[in-house]
């Protein structure tokens, strides 16, 4: 078993580009400095002014564009032989710094591996570079669609979604990506002189999920599908934030109502979204939902019970706001707000039953003079959860830290969306088993190095050029509903998975 190598700061940006290129043959590459610098950024530099500052000088050496799996294997071999860092990339829509290279190296653009390989038995298999929207376009004629997708569905790739994503549109019904059964299988390539191709299945898929591409190259993804209902987009307004929150909770708990999206915005958040202004009511809170057509009558009755008013009902993608409604939820909600309020930021808090609404109300009262609450509804560990925080004008790290402390005091678990490090972000459950998988798939520590390879956060920050985001007092998220199989797996925490070659 190889040991993951430690990082020598003196080697930073001393990558052997010439040697690496000599092993690539005719694989296309890009070395234009302006292009490489642009592709060394992801959406995190828009979402977090802290990451934007910390990542300002982090730039790759070149871009390599494999055309098929044989090219991917050649790239992996060339990296191992020359110790070239690799930064995997799909569309770069991630917003936690997953796509920022900390030690230069080669950005590996997987967009050419875009084939939807097959659909059968309510399951789809696609290459990692396939866009989420293309997968749905391939599966919907058969009556099925992805269970969940990011708000960046039109651009994001399935490999990027698995490697850096967490939840999204559909999570109010199906839970989060790490929940058992939401990722069925991954084909992965190890980065060593003789790369190996593995099939990772069962609970082992979570070793690669949300690992920021640090522990092997994902080349194919197998996902379960859900019925492709005719979805109705709705906008409803309620006289008070907690009325809206209680409605959203009731909708989430109504198992007979099939839904795909439940987004809550306190005034004035939705008013910052230019396209939503005609459909809100001043001083009211807004809930944007997607429900299956056959449940719209029951949905209307539920809105009425809470004193709400529906201002929009439209087929998916045909609303009067000129975009799919899911582009006003999750990460896209911030993007819409930032079009008119560029300095607004947020945190990622998890408000979880049994005291979900009580904790949300405490935060809403605490931050009423700071900014309106934005929340997304999802299932988490089998329970209803609200994810979000206030939207507020950024001042400095001390202000962000104060908001985080307040949310934690109110009862939320808080992840760190202002750092680009895996463990320190807190959304991924890490164990010795993850370290063993990393050693097996990336023995020379070349995959997105710096993001998940040192135990000490201070050493991590120093080796990577410093990160003020590390100092924020986030709690991370706990996954508490363990099955017996998970408990047994954790008892063998340092044992690598038995991969299928």
Image (spheres, rainbow, N blue to C red):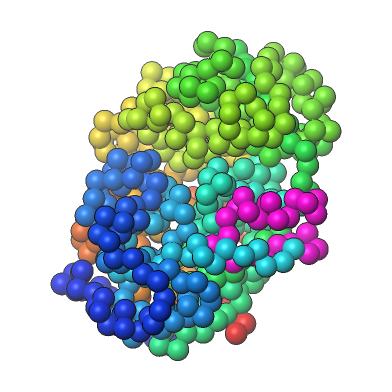
Residue 252 in sight in this render? no
Q: Residue 438: x and y, percent?
A: 44, 74
Could you say where residue 14 lies in the image, as x and y percent from the top left? 19, 73
Q: Quadrant of residue 297?
A: top right
Asked whether, in this view, residue 337 is left or right of residue 237, the answer is left
> x, y (%) of residue 467?
25, 52
112 shown above or below 346: below
Q: Residue at x 47, y 54 (%)?
A: 91
> Where on the picture, by quarter, is residue 78?
bottom left
- What is the quadrant of the N terminus in the image? bottom left
Q: Which residues are magenta?
A: 120-143
Pick the residue in front: 482 or 437: 437
The residue under the point 71% across, 59% down is 224
129 magenta-colored: yes
Q: Residue at x 27, y 52 (%)?
A: 55
Q: 489 or 276: nearer the eye?
A: 276
Q: How many marks?
A: 0
In-image side of 191 versus 56 (left or right): right
């Amino acid at each position: 078993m190889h040991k993951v190598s430690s990082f020598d700061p003196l080697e930073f940006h001393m990558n052997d580009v010439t040697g690496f290129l000599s092993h690539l043959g005719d694989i296309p590459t890009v070395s234009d400095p302006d292009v490489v610098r642009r592709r060394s950024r992801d959406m995190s530099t828009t979402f977090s002014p802290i990451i934007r500052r910390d990542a300002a000088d982090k730039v790759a050496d070149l871009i390599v564009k494999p055309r098929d799996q044989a090219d991917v294997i050649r790239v992996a071999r060339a990296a191992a032989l020359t110790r070239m860092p690799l930064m995997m990339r799909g569309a770069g829509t991630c917003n936690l710094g997953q796509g920022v290279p900390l030690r230069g190296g080669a950005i590996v653009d997987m967009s050419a591996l875009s084939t939807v390989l097959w659909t059968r038995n309510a399951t789809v298999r696609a290459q990692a570079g396939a866009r989420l929207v293309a997968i749905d376009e391939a599966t919907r004629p058969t009556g099925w669609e992805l269970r969940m997708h990011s708000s960046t569905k039109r651009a994001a790739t399935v490999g990027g979604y698995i490697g850096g994503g967490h939840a999204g549109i559909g999570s109010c019904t199906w839970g989060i990506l790490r929940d058992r059964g939401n990722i069925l299988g991954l084909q992965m390539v190890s980065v060593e002189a003789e790369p190996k191709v593995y099939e990772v299945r069962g609970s082992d898929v979570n070793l690669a999920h949300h690992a920021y591409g640090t522990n092997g190259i994902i080349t194919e993804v197998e996902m379960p599908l859900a019925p492709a209902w005719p979805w109705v987009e709705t906008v409803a307004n309620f006289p008070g934030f907690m009325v809206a929150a209680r409605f959203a909770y009731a909708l989430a708990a109504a198992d007979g109502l099939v839904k795909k999206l439940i987004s809550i915005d306190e005034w004035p958040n939705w008013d910052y979204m230019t396209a939503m202004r005609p459909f809100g009511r001043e001083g009211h809170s807004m809930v944007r939902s997607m429900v299956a057509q056959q449940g719209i009558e029951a949905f209307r009755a539920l809105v009425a019970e809470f004193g709400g008013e529906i201002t929009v009902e439209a087929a998916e993608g045909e609303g009067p706001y000129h975009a799919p409604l899911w582009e006003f939820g999750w990460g896209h909600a911030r993007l819409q707000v930032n079009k008119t309020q560029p300095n607004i930021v947020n945190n990622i808090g998890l408000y979880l039953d049994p005291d979900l609404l009580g904790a949300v109300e405490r935060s809403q009262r605490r931050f009423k003079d700071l900014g309106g609450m934005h929340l997304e509804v999802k299932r988490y560990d089998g329970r209803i959860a609200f994810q979000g925080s206030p939207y507020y004008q950024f001042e400095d790290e001390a202000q962000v830290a104060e908001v985080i402390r307040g949310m934690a005091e109110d009862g939320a678990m808080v992840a760190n969306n202002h750092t680009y490090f895996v463990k320190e972000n807190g959304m991924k459950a890490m164990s010795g088993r993850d370290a063993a998988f990393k050693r097996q798939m990336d023995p020379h520590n070349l995959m997105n190095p710096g993001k998940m390879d040192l135990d000490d956060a201070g050493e991590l920050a120093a080796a990577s050029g410093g990160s003020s985001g590390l100092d924020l007092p986030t709690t991370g998220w706990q996954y508490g509903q363990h099955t017996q199989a998970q408990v047994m797996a954790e008892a063998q925490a340092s044992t690598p998975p038995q991969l299928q070659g």
